[in-house]
Image (cartoon, grey):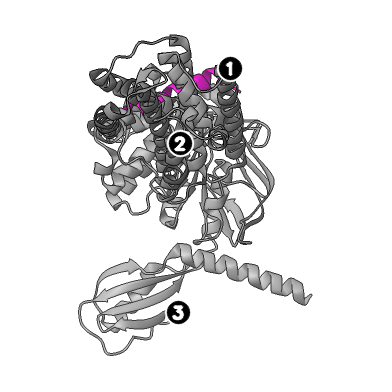
Amino acid sequence: MNLGLNAVAIRTLIHKETVRILRIWVQTIVPPAITMTLYFIIFGNLIGRRIGTMDGFDYMQYIAPGLIMMSVITNSYGNVVSSFFGAKFGRHVEEMLVSPMSNAAIIVGHVAGGVIRGLLVGGLVTIIALFFTRLEVAHPLIMLSMVVLSSIVFSLMGFINAIYAKKFDDISLIPTFILTPLTYLGGVFYSISLLPEFWQSVSKANPILYMVNAFRYGILGTSDISIGYAYAIVIFFVVALFTACLMLLNRGVGIRE
Amino acid sequence: MSAPSTQSPENTDINVAALSIKSLQKTYKNGQQALKGIDLTVDVGEFYALLGPNGAGKTTAIGIITSLVNKSAGEVSVFGHDLDRELEAAKACIGLVPQEVNLNQWESVGNIVMTQAGYYGLPRKLARERAEKYLRALRLWDRRDEPARNLSGGMKRRLMIARALVHEPKLLILDEPTAGVDIEIRRSMWDFLRDINNAGTTIILTTHYLEEAESLCRRVAIIDEGRIIEDASMASVLRKLQREVFVLSLSEPVAAAPELEGFETSLRNELELEVAMDRERNLNDLFRALESTGLNVVSMRNKSNRLEELFMRLVENKQSGSAGEAAS
């Protein structure tokens, strides 16, 4: 593999993705910011006042890390699935496929685009959160590494979704029927210690729970699960999903006849 | 359109073929056998035409060469780089202008070319210089900041050529590049491609216009039903066209087609006469014969789709050949 060529190709793809995100900022940045503002107002401010504290924190303070992580996850996924499927649909994916850039570079470039959008939206939601509550970062490195790793995981998932998608409906099925329910049940709005033991065990099968809790630990210093375990799960998903993406591209699934 | 220089002489190794295809086969999942074992060699510096009717297998062959389609069997190498073993090196040699417009309609003209350069590993500064060079050469520089969707059909085709050339490939493949392009732009594109070829780039062209292939290409392969049925110099292929049909517009209406010795005549309507003649015959003979009938001809055009005629003739030859083989 020509490393120099692929480094330039990845940089080019990242530049292209960044330009795309900023060009259509009304679609990519603004909607999640509005949605999260509504969450903060309704769940955090209006309903949260009646709930009181959770794990020793104001409800607003407790849900803020979860809402930030939720926006990062959905936007990372959404960016990659729409960008790569859009390229397939418009056939300009061929620009990459005929070029000597490696399949790994195609994946890395798109995932980087997903991470950039995830972090941009996450940063904006953090700023919005600061209008409603106070956030002191307890473990900055854990917070940063977990948000980036989680963003990578969901960018890779979005890439796989785009590979298999044949029509625009196919790129909204997984976010609607799998991603959103898992996010809502992933401890964004509550501590799983409130659940009966059986449902606590069920919740632990949800990978998003580990991401949300590890990220919350990075900010608030509190978590329902072991942080080491969370890292192991997230890193496992990064490696497994990247390998899956690479195998699919190498076989030409969804892109070559 | 004037083409800038693309290749330095040391870029071309004359000892290897620009493209070598051996026993290439492709069967799609639905069972359709698009290529039934084709062999093809394109020499370095060649301007090569790949002709064939719709569904003959041209685009599949190009798809395999450019790795957009997986082959079922066979070998392909580009400038000595085997697609199975040195895919990256082979891809770096190729520039593709596809049949269908596959531009990101929302991206600007300049960015499309710059991005493609980046995918081939060109640093940004060089990419910018190359983008300017080819966009100027293809008269698109003034439109560089506009999204591709604002361009006309002909401009989009030119943009795809600029995009394919930005990394200065040794082998340029054009899949019907002038389809739907008006005659003036088509001819200026021909001049441009001729200059690119003269500068050292090997070119493979598929087209429906025999006139285009005739004007540009020195060699031609004809593909039909997944098989190469002819691979020869353009001159020798054209010699196989024995017969031509002309349509003559008459100044006065006539009731019946006149009988002209040595020519087949028929009336298309009372003001248009069709005349079929062997290519060896002189047009002066036709006009002398017409003059003797007292008919006044105001204009004349070639009726036949020569490419179609060529296909028909070659396919007929192939069929009669195989029938002969079966009978013997």
Residue denoted by label 3: B262
Quarter holding residue B257? bottom left
Give the distance between the C-alpha atoms of the residues marked 3 and 2, in whole angstroms: 89 Å
| Residue B144 visible in image | no
Quarter holding residue A221? top left
Residue denoted by label 2: A185
Residue denoted by label 1: A228
Q: Are marks 2 and 1 in contact (CB under 8 Å)?
A: no
Q: Is residue B264 shown above or below A8?
A: below
Other-residue count near label 2 (Cα within 10 Å), few / some / many at <14 / 14–19 / ≥20: some
Q: Amino acid at mark 3?
A: Gly
Say which of marks 3 and 2 sits in front.
Answer: 2
Horizontal arrangement in the rendering, residue B135 relative to residue B42 (left or right):
left
Q: Magenta stretch?
A: A1-19
Mark 2 or mark 1: which comes first in sequence? Answer: 2
Farthest residue to the bottom: give it: B255
